[in-house]
Amino acid sequence: MEDMTYTIKSSEMSAIDTNCEYHGLSRLQLMENAGRGLAEEIRKFGKDKKILIFSGLGNNGGDAFVAVRHLRGFDITVFLLGKESEIKTDIAKRNFQLIKKVCRIKEIRNPDIELDDEFDIIVDAMLGTGVKGRLREPYSTAVELINSSDSFVVAVDVPTGLNPDTGEYDICVIADVTITFHKYKPGLLKASNVAGKVILKDIGIPEYLEKLAGPGDVHLAYKRRDDAHKGEHGRVLIVGGGEYTGAPALAALAALHSGADIVTLAVPESIKDIVAGFSPNLIVRGLKGSRISESNIQEIDELIKKHDVLVMGMGIGDKDFVEISEEILKGSVRRAVLDAEAITKDVPENVKCIITPHFGEFKRVFGRTPENEDEVKSFAKKHGITILLKSKKDIISDGEKIRVNESGNSGMTVGGTGDVLAGIVGALFCHADPLWSASASAFINGLAGDICFEEFGYNYTALDMLRKIPLAIKRSIEFL
Ligand SMILES: NC(=O)C1=CN([C@@H]2O[C@H](COP(=O)(O)OP(=O)(O)OC[C@H]3O[C@@H](n4cnc5c(N)ncnc54)[C@H](O)[C@@H]3O)[C@@H](O)[C@H]2O)[C@@H](O)CC1
Ligand SMILES: [K+]
């Protein structure tokens, strides 16, 4: 028995499929594997069967077009719910072209669909993980028709009408078998009454590629609304500085370049003017004294209340700061990104927390460096935090999932790139969950480094990198 608990939400599946395309495994290949897998299972129901395929206009339909090519010898009719010219994606279009001379095809343009023949098998390839809202016509009529037939019903990926994430439905295809791809969709497990027997087919996404961060991570984490008001794209508080002045400023500017609307820097009063002088974009508040100490905790907590995310630790340079960090976390904070000396594993349960250690900091906090990705995951799980371990290959885990990031280059060993990363994480974490905020940020940071490398070679600085963040985000968002 396969592990039915290993599920994937449709938004994550879509992110992984974007990342596959980015890293060289094309959607066309994935569709070919899905369609061939579907045909393989249909063959098991017997030879010489008469098959009717109800196909939608998205990639769910595309999977079935591929299957037709792999079902030589079967008598196949396709009911396309719409016009050929309305097929949404290039890959589905391409596969549709290839079956025009292979089977009978009828375009269904209105709800008056009739079954003028009997079929052994009906394949539901109308809607899969791309379904949104209530079923429109002619889909809902097609569902009723399928459910009133005596044919054996095979649903592709998910029965049409079923919400793949929640298992909710209004009207839905009642399938005898659902052939789903890559991983179980959570909705299938909650609605076995409509999904029938669920068969999982591998479509050739290797585990390392599923974990590898890419533009899909940015699609999940980066949110922007055209009708938003000032502040809605995130309010980030940066607490740092003392030994260094540049580090907290880099983090703050990185948060602004990553889309946060309001970024406030809280640094010791003694360096306030220096930090403010770096850029007119910075709003700087002075904390009494020349080092952040226990006496500043109250002031910091008041600022925390006005922001969505606290990013803390850059440029403090005081190894005892961790105790103050732990005290601050007991206050009003709900979302925190901890860097450098602020990193701790003792985080109250009501604080969602991302820590961004390099190997040395990881060892300080957990007592040893991790042997592998799974160890990072188990530390994250044990302490209820998300870890972004910075290295040539970044490892990210929230204790449930593991992400790995390989963007970036050795020019990034220059000082300040970690501060930039903390700022990006802070901005994304205003809207997204800890895992995807961390993995998307690691990818964006590395991509900004790669863009610098394209332009300057190795000898760029953290300041150059942060200027490339907007372009790195734009390239990621535009990669579909
Ligand atoms: N993501 C992946 O990695 C893979 C996905 N594949 C297939 O692709 C499917 C997802 O494809 P798509 O994202 O194109 O989405 P779908 O094919 O599920 O449906 C999208 C289309 O349905 C229409 N639609 C959405 N909601 C509707 C409603 N309530 N009533 C009527 N029409 C509605 C939309 O206009 C859109 O054109 C998966 O279920 C799977 O079958 C496979 O090719 C293999 C790889
Ligand atoms: K379907």
Image (cartoon, rainbow, N blue to C red):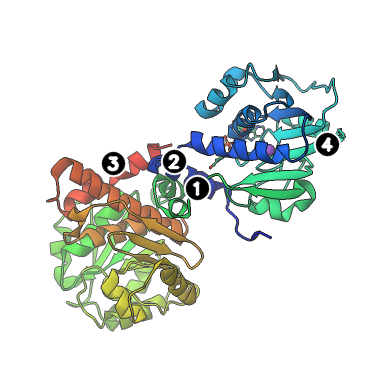
Badge 1 amino acid: Ile
Q: Nearer the viewer, mark 3 or mark 1?
A: 1
- Label placed on residue 471: 3
Q: What separation in Å lies between label 3 and label 1 (alpha carbons)?
A: 28 Å
Q: What separation in Å lies between label 1 and label 4 (alpha carbons)?
A: 33 Å
Q: Secondary structure at mark 1?
A: loop
Dots 2, 1 in contact, CB < 8 A? yes
- Label placed on residue 147: 4
Q: Earlier in the sequence, mark 2 or mark 1?
A: 2
The residue under label 2 is 25
Q: Nearer the viewer, mark 4 or mark 2?
A: 2
Q: How many marks?
A: 4
| Label 4 Cα neighbours within 10 Å, binned few <14 / some 14-19 / many ≥20 | some
Q: Secondary structure at mark 3?
A: helix
Dots 4, 3 in contact, CB < 8 A? no
Q: What separation in Å lies between label 2 and label 1 (alpha carbons)?
A: 8 Å
Badge 4 amino acid: Asn
Question: For this rendering, which residue is in front, 40 or 345?
Answer: 40
